[in-house]
Amino acid sequence: MRGAVEKVLGLLRDGRVDPAALRERLDGLGHDMRLEVTRALGSREQRRLYEAVEGFETLALVDLVPAHVGDMSEVRHFGRNTLPAFTHFEKRFCRPAGSSAERPERLYGYNHAAMRPLIGPGYFVARASQPAGEVLVDYNELPASAPESWPGIRRNEVGVSRFVYGFMVDSLRRVSEHVSIGSAARRGREMGSWFVLCREV
């Protein structure tokens, strides 16, 4: 497994990152190894990855919640961010009831993390960003509903949540079939903070 990690890290440390080679490498791995690889990506690798895949391929909402998944059924995306602590988390997405399975207009989601009792669930609505070919994860808008197993929906602009999720919009870009890379912005200003996501199989 260590060899697979080093090969991907090598692709991200070369002078010029080749998105197609990186996609091929990640698509050839099983879930466990792909997760190991993405969780090994530090701040430098995530920044380079985010820059390298700009405009490479379109990330659609159906890539985050595949069409075969039922409405209001969660899909887990295992993440690693570039913060100094609590780097592992999950973004959990679902498709709203009554949406097109192939072309949903929005997804609902929240952040599942060890610090959730303190910082809140960080609910969001995800939409396609045209013509950028990216997905925007908007914490300024709350889902209209949530699966029964999810925590209660609460605003992001109150309490401790304000300092973590308040006024935030993440931009997500496609890396491979299961992997995406994001950048966080608050009030329209990039924060210099990235995160990588690996979708469950």
Image (tube, grey):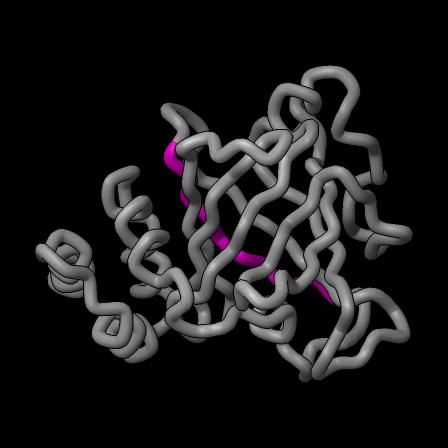
Q: Residue at x 31, y 44 (%)?
A: 47
> What quarter of the picture does the N terminus occupy?
bottom left
Compared across the picture, whether 58 is left or right of 50 comes to: right
Vertical placement of residue 109 versus 23, above or below: above
Do we see residue 1 in this rendering? no
Q: Position of residue 126 (x, y in %)?
A: 69, 56
Q: Residue furthest front?
A: 131
Q: Position of residue 35 (x, y in %)?
A: 36, 59
Q: Position of residue 201 (x, y in %)?
A: 50, 72
Q: Nearer the viewer, residue 99 or 37?
A: 99
How many labels, in total?
Answer: 0
Instruction: Please identify the quarter of the rendering in which residue 102 is found.
Output: bottom right
Vertical placement of residue 145 versus 112, above or below: below
Magenta stretch, overall SS: strand
Q: Nearer the viewer, residue 30 or 194?
A: 194
Compared across the picture, whether 52 is left or right of 114 comes to: left
Q: Residue at x 80, y 43 (%)?
A: 141
Instruction: Please identify the quarter of the rendering in which residue 198 is found.
Output: bottom left
Q: Residue at x 69, y 24 (%)?
A: 161
Q: Is residue 190 magenta?
A: no
Do we see residue 194 in this rendering? yes
Q: Which residues are magenta?
A: 73-82
Q: Nearer the viewer, residue 82 or 17?
A: 17
Q: Residue at x 75, y 29 (%)?
A: 156
Q: Position of residue 89 (x, y in %)?
A: 51, 42
